[in-house]
Image (cartoon, helix red, strand yellow):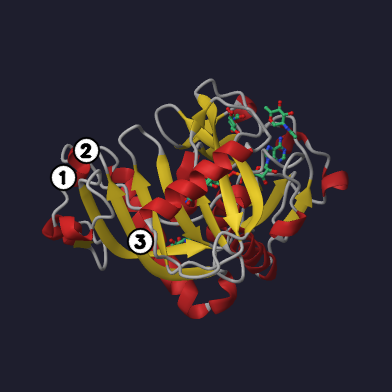
Amino acid sequence: MSAEIVVIGAGVIGLSCAIKLQANFTVTIVAKDFPAPFETIDPIAQINYTSPWGGAHNRWVPPSPSGENAREHAFALTTWKHMRALRDVNPESGITFMKGIEYLEAPSIEYTSLTEARAKELNMEGFRLLQPGEFPDDRVKWGCVYDTWCVNPMVYCCFLLRKFTMGGGRIRKRELRDVAEVFALPPEDFGLGRVDAVVNASGYGIGADPNMYVTKGQTCLVGDPCPATLTRQNADGSWTFSVPRGYDGGTVIGGTKEVDDWGTRPSEEVREKLLGDFRETWPGVPAGRFYTVIADIVGRRPTRKGGPRIEGEAIKDGHFVMHAYGLGGRGYELSWGVAEEVAKRVEDHFA
Ligand SMILES: Cc1cc2nc3c(=O)[nH]c(=O)nc-3n(C[C@H](O)[C@H](O)[C@H](O)COP(=O)(O)OP(=O)(O)OC[C@H]3O[C@@H](n4cnc5c(N)ncnc54)[C@H](O)[C@@H]3O)c2cc1C
Ligand SMILES: *[C@@H]1O[C@H](CO)[C@@H](O)[C@H](O)[C@H]1NC(C)=O
Ligand SMILES: *[C@@H]1O[C@H](CO)[C@@H](O)[C@H](O)[C@H]1NC(C)=O
Ligand SMILES: *[C@@H]1O[C@H](CO)[C@@H](O)[C@H](O)[C@H]1NC(C)=O
């Protein structure tokens, strides 16, 4: 009989882990929030459910010459390849491949050392350095383009949930007080046998880890499509970006990164600044009708000092918990790498 695994969380991380684990285990997802059409997600009551509020695109973060970020880059590559395969086999999955454009005003060593040869070693397909004549203005000091993907978050997460369920996965919509509660749930209420292991993919939700904090992000959803995902990093630390969601989902124009800010309300002033900065960076594009404001978005990136926690832990009574949280602003782009690592470590635990 295969082991029973409970995955806590139905954000992009919990769903991806659950699908990977399903190959060899009996898997149940327990979560307070599940994916649903974007229009039905409540911006206040579900603000802690981060996955609907993401862009979401893949933006390469190159490892430094001394190897920082190497694990994350490997996760991003695994995800990129998996996204391309899914797009080919399941065109309904909400994934669109397009060009990613980057403009940097104050590039760090990770970028200035990123030649086309180095990008090839790092497997960044379609990578090309931009020439100064291609920059939008002279504050930009470095730029590149590459082949990347964007997803429409709720189209994609609903697809993952369907795939999991059609693969025999079970779901329970519950709010838990503690990870350990899963091991104590009465089988008659819960409809499960013994639980052999738990995956903690709770985003920020259970909140006992002192290294966790939130990074608030405000973006603006416009109703129009956009031909590429563009990211500009300004010298003052602010960001300007577009993330086309595809599948009639419009384009996200962003965005702020506000550490430890628990605010829930979008600011109109911030919205006007985001749209204005984007217009300046990409004046001609897209032509005609653009900037039909549909909604202001506020989300909380579940961020962790020291980076994501992807590790197993024996908690009281010898129960095994595999942690998969703290993905910050990179949950989508690292998702399949994280899921593969989680599945491997759970396999090892039972080997
Ligand atoms: C403005 C913005 C833009 C972003 N853009 C991008 C981008 O372009 N690319 C990218 O890769 N990432 C992006 N992100 C980040 C990305 O959205 C997150 O990293 C990702 O959604 C985190 O997923 P998760 O599954 O860890 O958490 P969540 O989506 O928050 O899911 C947590 C799950 O755990 C459940 N849960 C929590 N607590 C409990 C409990 N006590 N009991 C039961 N269930 C519980 C929740 O109900 C939910 O199902 C962006 C985020 C924001 C805010
Ligand atoms: C499932 O188990 C097989 C055999 O042990 C192993 O080769 C495979 O990697 C496992 N699948 C996953 C997704 O971990
Ligand atoms: C979001 O999480 C915070 C911190 O755990 C909590 O105080 C708040 O009540 C949550 N908000 C909602 C709407 O659940
Ligand atoms: C589970 O994840 C949360 C983040 O949502 C973290 O704070 C907590 O420490 C983790 N572990 C346990 C055993 O709760």
Ligand 1, image quadrant it occupies:
top right
Disc 3 marks which residue? 100
Kindly identify the residue that appears in the image at 49 percent across and 23 percent down.
Answer: 211
Q: Is residue 75 visible?
A: yes
Badge 2: how crowded within 10 Å, few (<14), some, or many (20+)?
few
Q: CA–CA distance between discs 2 and 3?
A: 19 Å
Q: Is residue 197 visible?
A: no
| CB within 8 Å, label 1 to label 3 | no
Tell me if 8 is positioned left or right of 122 in this view.
Answer: right
Q: Position of residue 177 (x, y in %)?
A: 74, 30
The three-letter code of the residue at mark 3 reads: Gly
What is the total number of numbered labels drawn onto the structure image? 3
Kindly identify the residue that appears in the image at 30 percent across and 41 percent down.
Answer: 69
Q: Which mark is residue 281?
A: none
Q: CA–CA distance between discs 1 and 3?
A: 18 Å
Q: CA–CA distance between discs 1 and 2?
A: 6 Å
The three-letter code of the residue at mark 1 reads: Thr
Kindly identify the residue that appears in the image at 54 percent across and 78 percent down.
Answer: 91
For mark 1, give the secondary structure: helix
- Quarter residue 126 falls in: bottom left
| CB within 8 Å, label 2 to label 3 | no
Name the outermost residue toward the right: 188
Label 1 or label 3, whichever comes before in sequence order: 3
| CB within 8 Å, label 1 to label 2 | yes
Disc 2 marks which residue? 108
Kindly identify the residue that appears in the image at 74 percent across and 51 percent down.
Answer: 41
Tell me if 140 is positioned left or right of 290 in this view.
Answer: left
